[in-house]
Image (cartoon, coloured by chain):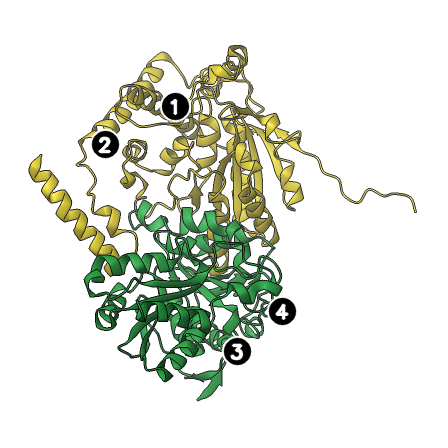
Amino acid sequence: MAKLTVVEAINLALKQEMEKDHRVLILGEDVGKNGGVFRVTQGLLDIFGEARVMDTPLSESAIAGVAIGMAIYGLRPIAEIQFEGFVYAAMEQIANHAGRIRTRSRGRYHCPLVVRLPYGGGIRAPEHHSDSNETYFVHTPGIKVVVPSTPYEAKGLLISAIRDPDPVIFMEPKKIYRSLREEVPEDEYIVPLGEARIVQEGTGITLITWGAMLQPTLQAAALMEKNGTKAEIIDLRTLSPLDSETIIASVKKTHRAVVVHEAPATCGVGAEIVARINEKALVYLEAPVQRVTGFDTIMPLPKLEKYYLPDAGRVIEAANRTVNF
Amino acid sequence: MPKQVIETFSVEWLQILDEDGNCDEELRPSLDNEQVKKLYESMVLARTFDDKAFKLQREGRLGTYASILGQEAAQVGSAYALRPTDWMFPAFREPGASFVRGLPMRMIFQYWAGDERGSQIPEGLNDFPITIPVATQIPIAVGVALAAKAKGDAIAVMAYMGDGATSKGDFHEGLNFAGVFAAPVVFVCQNNQWAISVPLKRQTASRTLAQKAFAYGFPGVQVDGNDVFAVYRATSEALMRAREGGGPTFIECLTYRLGDHTTADDASRYRSPEQVEQWKKKDPIERLRKYLEKGGLWNKAYDQAVSSQAKEKVESAVHEEESLPPPDPLDMFRFTYQDLPADLREQMEGFVNTNGRRDQRE
């Protein structure tokens, strides 16, 4: 089995789904000849041609809107928005149309669309290239939000997203695009949407995270284990719809939880998770649930980003507050 | 080096039927008498509907409604040029076009009465529901056009908008995209010269809206939007070209919003009654009536029949809408996703429990 990066795993998923289903096509800025600024679509133009790998004008709202129209007409478009900082121009199309059309037309139309969205910090990118803006999408009804944390997850989740009958925002953590390699089966497989995964079982505390933050969470858990606390780690994988069941079951077992995410704290997905734990498992808790997040500040430029992004030290600190409560 | 002119453009104005019902027979589209009468009857129906919708709103039987008074030719003439296999994207002021397409009138009443089932376009009718966020339907229409092109379906897409839409980013992004990929789409702009209280001169410094098309690399034309022949001719030619792979066209229908922006608006706050009176003289229905009369196709008996048939259709649509059972509240949940996610199911069950108790108390 080949060891692939996240970029290679996504590329493989795209290629295989395009081979399998002629309705699948890619559109976005620089996705053709250039293979995408992160090379995620590399080689696909040569295989599938310009009609299915479309270099578009620099036009995020039209990329999203055109993709919505294509989906409504029966194709399976995958739109790439080059960086999360540029998705706001497409937000009106996503919130007002992609997420609403099934409801407002009472099922006459639906929108099987994937928006691929490289996001997040940690790669020393310029301004507007490092935000974690998943909450906007999670807060928007009618769309699903998916974040892979490893190459294996990336391939299986993307295939599910492409086959899903509803619009999916597929957020790709740039930090782990090439920093991880793992064995990824050549054959197609799916990782179902809406199901979190237990990365490691434990009984001392539940650490809940997704995307690039899985790595510092794993580091923190390894250090905590040396000190006698075996953490259970949950990788959410899908942020909307959220798999409450896995979270609640784990918290009932461990009685403690910390949520780790890059995005700002206020109204971050962590806040929603804490609320759900309060609603369903409050009496099982030995300590308040802690959050390790970015700050409610503007994401800084590279020279300060290490202070903004959660790391293993901050996770351990929060876990200790919980354990020693 | 001397300066050189490397690009020029000129904007055509098309009028076939003037205010007095005089027709340029050379430009007149080849429509037989029955078809011309059909155009007339469709415009009368649209106006009858509009009048009724306004009154229903005043009686509290309809929510906010956006009148089409004076814009009947722009809507009927353009929609009449469509084939059933073509797709149509309305903005929110095109019921006249929707009726020509075959949308049951009951559904437009439903929509403005606050019942989302009014947007459940019947199977087989290739129309998008009303789109309120201005210009956002444009990129989607371009997407449908490009998908049809990719599949090899020889159809065209018509996307409506108002003059205000030409100031929006989605107008630019959508038209630019359509030009680059030669999408089979026809943009029909009902330039009624008002975006609520803001006049056209605050939307653009361009002399026409039509000329904007040239910047996107495809033709734009300005037609007399109150002349149903001009609208029909321009749109049918553009649709034909689109279906044959000739790419997009932008058609500016110069018209006038005789009524308020919506029933929640009072246009006397920002425009003069004289201007409105001037435009009443250019009435699209009246000029076709004159034309029909000159050709011996109109008389009082015909007029009465057309008017009473329209009233009957409208009354029956109102009755149909008002007799419908209210929408099922669970529809809120049912159509958010294809399959109801667990957390949403829980919200729905909570709603059912609470609501059940509340219903019992009442």
Q: Of tags 1 and 3, which is closer to the observer?
A: 3
Distance between the alpha carbons at the discs numbered 1 and 3: 57 Å
**Residue B280 spot, x, y in % from top left:** 49, 15
- How dense is the environment of label 2, judged by Cα within 10 Å: few (below 14), some, or many (20 and up)? many
The residue type indicated by label 3 comes to: Ser
Of residues B341 and A44, the one drawn nearer to the viewer in this rendering: B341
Q: Which residue is mark 1?
A: B264
Whether residues under marks 4 and 2 lie with C-beta atoms below 8 angstroms apart, the answer is no
Is disc 4 placed on a helix, strand or loop?
loop
Left or right: residue A106 versus residue A307 is left
Which mark, residue A165?
none
Of residues A278 and B18, the one drawn nearer to the viewer in this rendering: A278
Distance between the alpha carbons at the discs numbered 4 and 2: 55 Å
**Residue B282 spot, x, y in % from top left:** 52, 17
Same-subunit check for callouts 4 and 2: no
Pointer 3 indicates a residue of which chain? A
- Quick check: can you spot residue A208? no
Quarter of the image where the C terminus of chain B is located: top left
Pointer 4 indicates a residue of which chain? A
The residue type indicated by label 1 comes to: Ala
**Which chain has been coloured yellow in this picture?**
B
In the depicted structure, whether residue B221 falls above or below residue B68: below
The residue type indicated by label 4 comes to: Asn
